[in-house]
Image (cartoon, rainbow, N blue to C red):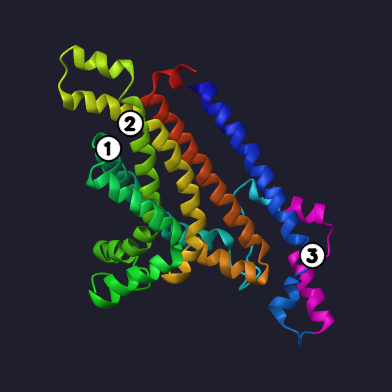
Amino acid sequence: MARFILRRLLSGAVLLLAVSIATFFLARLSNADPTLTLLGTGATDAQRDALAQRFGLDQPLGAQFWEWFSRAVVGDFGESWKGFTSVNKELAVKVPVTLSVIVFATLLSAVFGTIVGVVSGLFQGGVVDRVVKYASVLLYALPGFWLSFVLITWFAVQLKWFPAVGYIPPTTSILGWLGSITLPAVSLALGAIVMIAEQLRNSIIQNSTKDYVRTLRSRGLSEARVVVHLVRNSAPEALAVLAVLFVGLLSGAVVVETIFALPGIGMLANASSLIGDMPTLMGITVVSILIVIIVNALLDLVLGWLNPKVRVS
């Protein structure tokens, strides 16, 4: 276990460094001039030079990256180029908003995807199985932002069950917080539910023909216990899909947060990219990669618990 964790930490560190370098140099090598974006076309050359000096843009790219990296390794992402506020403080406010939506969407995907997938796999060709097939085709064809607008129209405007836009912190109201993240989470989870259900369905159908299932039934085990073993052996494939979907949900937060006016890192990334705010963009990149690394590590631990072969290897 210690070697596994060490390997995960090392691979995560390499991934984090590689993505940080690529993001920094690709963003800085673009033609956009952040001083021109921030000050406008009416600024004088002296004003732009002074701002560039404050941001360290007058230094070589290598020196700029080292300046950022030397501070980032100790957890200091520097100062935002817009408003000159601490990036750490901005992320401390924005990250919980995004995580609450993504974690809720992941839970919805896991719970409903598992239920639908198990029923669809055990009763192949049944009503639920046919609904999953039709829903998969429909959700693949429809754009995600359109589904968000449909949810807002139905459940916020017409039924008035949830707020259309905005975010309520859990410290203000737990019910209000759940209400404000439900529609965004459902919007993200709809496609993921179908993908998890399809993967689990296919795994259950494939595993149901294996020898160990017949052996369990021949030993007199109840059908419920056989189903439990069947689902447990079919779960790793669905969990792998869930981990990939989690990364997709993280990237999809940019669109969803813009539609539902949620003050998360997706909306922050969109605003920062428009003005070339490098410290904020780099902070978002590092935090996002760290979240992905943690999720993948947790997935490996769960897979090891479900599958002894993985645990031994």
Q: Which residue is mark 3?
A: 57
Give the residue type at disc 2: Ile
| Prevailing secondary structure class for the magenta stretch in the rendered image | helix
State yes or no: residue 48 in magenta: yes
Compare residues 55 and 168 and report the one nearer the observer.
168
Instruction: Kindly indicate whether the residue at mark 1 contacts the one at mark 2 (C-beta within 8 angstroms).
Output: yes
Q: Residue at x 43, y 18 (%)?
A: 309
Instruction: Give the secondary structure at mark 1.
Output: loop
Lateral position of residue 205 relative to residue 289, left or right: left
Read off the magenta span: 44-67
Q: Which residue is mark 2?
A: 205
First of labels 1, 3 by sequence position: 3
The image position of residue 138, as x and y in percent, is 39, 58
Q: Is residue 78 above or below residue 308?
A: below
Query: 10 Å neighbourhood of mark 3: few (<14), some, or many (≥20)?
Result: some
Q: Is residue 194 above or below residue 204?
A: below
State yes or no: residue 47 in magenta: yes
Quadrant in the picture for residue 184? bottom left
Lateral position of residue 123 relative to residue 261, left or right: left
